[in-house]
Amino acid sequence: MIKTVHVSHIGRVRSVNEDSAWIRNLDTGYILGIVADGMGGHLAGDTASRLAVETLVQDLGTLEPGLSHASLSAALSDAILHANEVIFRTASSDDNYHNMGTTVVAALLNDTEGVIGHIGDSRAYKIANKHVIQLTEDHTLVNELFKNGQISKEDVSHHPRRNVLTRALGTDAEVKVDLDTVKLEEGEVLLLCSDGLSNLVSNEQIIQVAGNLELALEDRADRLLQLALLAGGDDNITVALFELQKEGSVTSETGCES
Amino acid sequence: MIGHQLGGRYEVIERVGGGGMALVYKAQDLLLNRNVAIKVLRQQFVHDEEFIRRFRREAQSAASLSHPNVVSIYDVGQEDDVHYIVMEYVEGKNLNEIIKERAPLQVDEAVRIASQIADALDHAHHNQIIHRDIKPHNILIGRNGRVKVTDFGIARAVTSTTITQTGSVVGSVHYFSPEHAKGIVTGEKSDLYSLGIVLYQMLTGQLPFLGESPISVALKHLQEEFDEPRKFNPLIPQSVENVILKSMRKNPQERYQSAKEMQTDLETCLMPERRNETKIDFPDEDDIDQTRVMPAIKPEPRGVTSTGAIPAMESDEDNHKGKPKTKNWKKPALLISLTVLILIAMVGVVWYVKGMLVVPDVTVPNVVGQTEEKARQMLQDQGLVVSDEVIRQYKEDVEPGIVFDQTRNEGDVVKEGSEVQLSVGAEKELTQMISVEGNTYDEAVKKLIELGINGDQIKRKDDYSNDIVSGNVISQTPGVNEKFDPEAIEIVLTVSKGPKTIKMPDLKNHTRSEAESMLKSAGLILAQVQEESSYTVDKGKVTQQWPVEAGAEVNPGDKITIFISTGYPPEALNYAYNINVSPKEIGKSSKIRITFEDARGKSQEWGTRTIKSAQMLTIPLILAPNVDGVVSVYRDGQFLDTYLVSYSDAKNGTVVVPTIEPEKGAEPPPTTEEPEQGGGGDEGTVDTQQEGEPDTPVEGEGENDEADTSAKKNGNGLAKGKDKKKEVVNASSRP
């Protein structure tokens, strides 16, 4: 049984929460979780992330049950591309939304296996056995520079332009979605988050908190959030967790917006 | 904004441009009666205090610049949440437009423009202002030809973390200096690099680094060399190219040290005495490596000072002086040993010649049909020598590598050591395929025939292509540079039939997502989705497609706009029209058939109903202000009457409920109770009949047909129409 939880917080500096999140066990048997981090200034950023979540929920909420992995991947990719179209159209038709965009990371699971689609620098991690694996690759300038050997790992976290994205949802008519496969074993945790968390909380902290099976899943999400706030909270923070729990535990969905 | 008065002083006239961060308007300064340009921060940023602070600060520092080649800042202001900068209005074009229109520019013009930009940068740099975003869009050329650089320091405000930064990267990445792309400090020399690129672009009409994405362009600034400008435009003098090469060095240390230095170089580079300048030379990466490893290879010269080098040379000369002494006693020994060697050699030659004189005879074996290796072995075994010159040629029926001829025939008796020349089969000589792609079919055939191919070896295939003009070759087998046997090959040329046209699918009455996937699978693009109300198409479904009707020919990639029904328009009136109908004769069955027309269409079938007593029948109508309802009643196949239901009557509730009397028997019209009883009983009958005989209409087949066609006519296959049709069939099938 997969248990899910998500929390989102405006942080200590920003005046608007431009992150949007959604996570649920669907009636069709799938589990869908989405984290989107909008950008584009007043009203535009939160609109972009909200449109992304709404479009994905609407498109994926009515999938027929029992699809193959390939079909799930295709459906998720299509839904993200559809969201791109929706945001891009809204941005082009209204000057107030000029050039808005958002990141997105979405996990669509069928039982314990599924697919992760992402664009931008919101991330998916898997925490298993005191290890953390980053499943997604950031679409950022610094990551490209790092991959090309232009800057070192240390430079990545101090680069003045580290929040420049090379790919975002809704800023261009066309976009490419990165898809990754994910499979959860018992006691493993899947984490989706915005950069408000990943920029401030270290991998070790993530392992310690998210991998602490003693704690209730809600408490773990909340603790991660508090860690990011303690580290400065200079951006909106969003955390979504999935955990494969032992058969018989109660599935629940909790969310809180602040 | 237009017509608005900002700060009680600037009357906004028109919008003249806009970027990611601000919109630019032309305005009239009412106080000084002159035109000004006003940059207004986009609404989405006005709530971001940090950003506003930077915006103002940068604008203020840029305002300290006063130079004929810098767009002057007159004023910075705020009115409610409108933040703006008032600037000098430059009548003319920006350099980007000029480059688009007529690049490459004349060398002297380009140099003059670049020199003025350098002058502006020099002034700014002296005031500790780095532009950070030098690009043709930010360079205005006035009507008098004066160059004005704008947007000083603004780029710095944009680097705030709150702004969508994809836009800012995409915009100017082509002019990024490598250090800017890398994110290290950008300084004066970054502006010089960008200016070098602008000069490059003015003179060649192209950008030095192009890529599919901003990131690939940024990486090229860091990693790749660019094509030298003179490759594209040989008219560029070497001295001018040198300016570009120097300003575009990846290492800032190798660029000009200041904007002033670059400007001076630009001003003198077209002087006659620099006409024969040679290409500027920079130690490339390898050279730098060499200097680094040098100490390891030559430690001594490095350790010795320049003055100390002379003694070292002297000691060398000393060595030379000492040498002759040793040579003196070595010479006789050498002479003696040489003589001994020659003697030995002579003896050897005598022995050899002696041996030659007694050469035995050998018989030549047959080696035809053997592999070359085997043949050599066989001949050597016999003491024969195989000539180095082996004749290799293609021979029919001879495998490559097999001997097919020998110069001495089998059985010949020859001296041992005689030479035998072999002829060995070789691979057939192959021809290399040339490229005929993009040629017309006839040209391609001509070229291939010139290559020695017979015309009937060329096969033609036709296919669609979006890129290749109709009649030209899209592809060829064998491909370019493939080897082939010109006698046996069959060449296939695929010739374009032009772009494939497809039949436009009929999207009408499909849902939006159905229509989208239909367009997608047909290779068409959904351009726009508009909404309109419709009487005939269900809400959420497509009412019309534009600009191509179903069945017409379209090209893949064509853009189609669809209109989605929002259902009936708000003024539509849903009205249940009642008629009292009696059978022909009370107590006996009469079949009542009703047709109607309303806003949804003409001659729609309501259905038939068999009644024995007088009943109230209800016909649901949809009325529009300009379309009245018309209801026609038939009894036992006989037309009785037509009733008009006007929109205004229906709206006001003043529709008369007509009553149709029985034909025979002067029975009074039924009481109000009767229709209900009769109706209820009747429906019950209908139900059982439906279950009993669902498909076979026993009677009234003619009516059935009619109902069918009418449903098709106006229903056009939409769900509503289909339901109605079903109802009709069932109702009329009862006996």
Image (tube, rainbow, N blue to C red):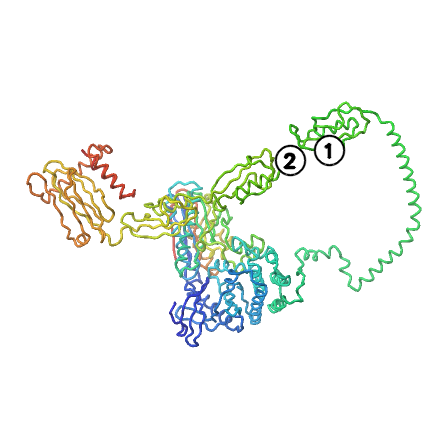
Alpha carbon of mark 1 to alpha carbon of mark 2: how far?
17 Å
Name the residue located 23 percent from the left edge and 45 percent from the top edge: B602
Position of B558 relative to B126 (above/below):
above
Task: Give the left or right position of residue A209, taking residue B540 as reference.
Answer: right
Position of B311 relative to B404 (above/below):
below
Placement of the C terminus of chain A among the 4 image quadrants: bottom left
Say which quarter of the image contains residue B115: bottom right
Q: Residues within 10 Å of mark 1 (few under 14, many from 20)?
A: some
Give the amino acid type for the residue marked by disc 1 in the picture: Val
Position of B174 relative to B376 (above/below):
below
Residue B37 locus on image (x, y percent): 45, 69
Residue B515 in view of the camera: yes
Give the amino acid type for the residue marked by disc 2 in the picture: Glu
Secondary structure category for the residue under label 1: loop
Q: Nearer the viewer, residue B347 or B417?
A: B417
The residue beneath circle 1 is: B390
Residue B479 locus on image (x, y percent): 57, 40
Secondary structure category for the residue under label 2: loop
Residue B171 locus on image (x, y percent): 50, 59
Q: Nearer the viewer, residue B434 or B516?
A: B434
Placement of the N terminus of chain A among the 4 image quadrants: top left
The residue beneath circle 2 is: B429
Name the residue located 20 percent from the left edge and 45 percent from the top edge: B596
